[in-house]
Amino acid sequence: MLDHATNELLTRVGPGTPCGELLRRYWHPVGYSSELAEAGQTKRVRILGEDLVLARTGNGGVLLVQERCPHRGASLLYGFVEEATIRCAYHGWQYNAAGECVERPFESAKASRVCKKLIDSYATHECGGLIFAYMGPAEQKPAFPNWDILVRNDGVRHFEVQDDLACNWFQVQENAVDVTHTFYTHSKYFEHLGMRDASGFGKPFKRFGFQRFDWGIVKSWEYEGEGRGWGNLMVFPNMLRIMTEMHWRVPVDDTTTRIVWVSFTPNADGAQPPADEAPKIVRQPARTDSAGRYLMDTFMSQDAMAVETQGPIFDRSRENLGASDRGIVMFRQMLQEQIDAVARGERPVANVYGGAPDVTDLRAWMGGYLPMSCAPDPTFRQQREFGDIFDESHVEYEIPANSPVMRA
């Protein structure tokens, strides 16, 4: 349970909020490269409570600036993109990627020469078919991590797109460190509908636990039967890594969250696809019926029910946690620690400082493999057995003998 003040601290993401300041220290996906395939194309973006415009410049780059022109407030979405600048379609004021106004037609020559920063602008980076933004202080900008799932070229990438979630990002990410919901929300509900659940989530539990590591939290659980387990990663602050998938929970604003889902299918022979082959975008089916009732027939609709029905921002002063919620408590502690660290002027964890790595591969922290929607990876050699994972660093939960999910 959290008091009201702490709940506000951990959920509000707009400019100037403590959590918003922390989240702005990381790279977040804001668009797909295919959406800006041609020079001059623009796209409206809302992230962390800010309304912005992405634009493909004439030199092939991407600039990200506030949507409203500071002159008279017209939208730069309709602006003219000229080389590395964008010009407002209302009166022609022109801005570069640094947010400087480099030309003001109809003003004096002296006024037009003043390169004063008039609009908010943010750094961008393209990788693996995604466009990322960094919205924090320029002097504290981390290197882009070059996630393996985005830079590998021995398989095929695709993006799974779904409607935005009508709730705060924090309750969506808490679900990423909630082990026990998989038994009822997913497996039991598929069983209830008479559908086959290929995840294996309904197997009798043996044990599960949580472990902090440099990039976040390892959550692991083991089923009855040798070699049947699962170990995936909550990558701080708002990612989930599941073998050959990576999901970002992007805070659009305080009450809206966008899931950016990347799946990578390795080629069994390691062959590379054509260099010009763009990742496919797959649209997920609707989560609700025409009456607004959750269909509950996919993982996405089941998770959406769980997080959206808590309300736009869940009031955690009304919750009653159990011992099995240790992963959620661990994540809350980690988030509050890093908010405090940024407030002290320190760098937050789970970032790359200095030169950009060739690749950031966290698979060594995973253990076991339970086939789900993600593809097996022939390049991965499991380095940690479950006996190694559940060591003294793990906060392990012992399932009561009378639990309906306990092994027989």
Image: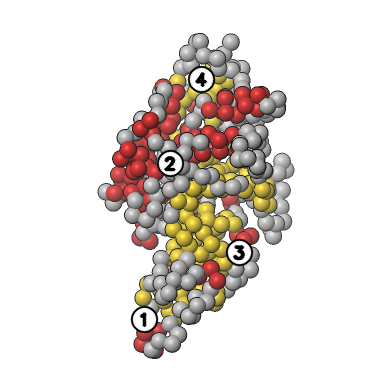
Q: Mark 3 Cα within 10 Å, few/some/many (few <14, many 20+)?
A: some
| 3D distance between C-alphas at marks 4 and 3 | 47 Å
> Which residue is labeled 3 in the image?
36
Q: Quadrant of the N terminus?
A: top left
Q: Is 408 situated above or below 174?
A: above
Q: Mark 4 Cα within 10 Å, few/some/many (few <14, many 20+)?
A: some
Q: Residue at (64%, 35%) from the top-left corner? A: 295
Q: Can residue 234 be seen in the rendering of this structure?
A: no
Q: Position of residue 200 (x, y in %)?
A: 64, 25
Return the mark for residue 10.
none
The tag earlier along the polypeptide, 1 or 4, is 1
Looking at the picture, which amino acid does disc 2 mark? Ile
Q: Residue at (55%, 14%) from the top-left corner? A: 404
> Which residue is labeled 2 in the image?
313
Q: Give the secondary structure at mark 1.
A: loop
Return the mark for residue 207.
4
| 3D distance between C-alphas at marks 4 and 2 | 31 Å
Return the mark for residue 114.
1
Q: Position of residue 262 (x, y in %)?
A: 60, 46
Q: Nearer the viewer, residue 352 or 373?
A: 373
| 3D distance between C-alphas at marks 1 and 4 | 65 Å
The tag earlier along the polypeptide, 2 or 3, is 3
Q: Is 247 situated above or below 321?
A: below
Q: Give the secondary structure at mark 4.
A: strand
Label 4 close to label 2 by CB (< 8 Å): no
Label 1 close to label 4 by CB (< 8 Å): no
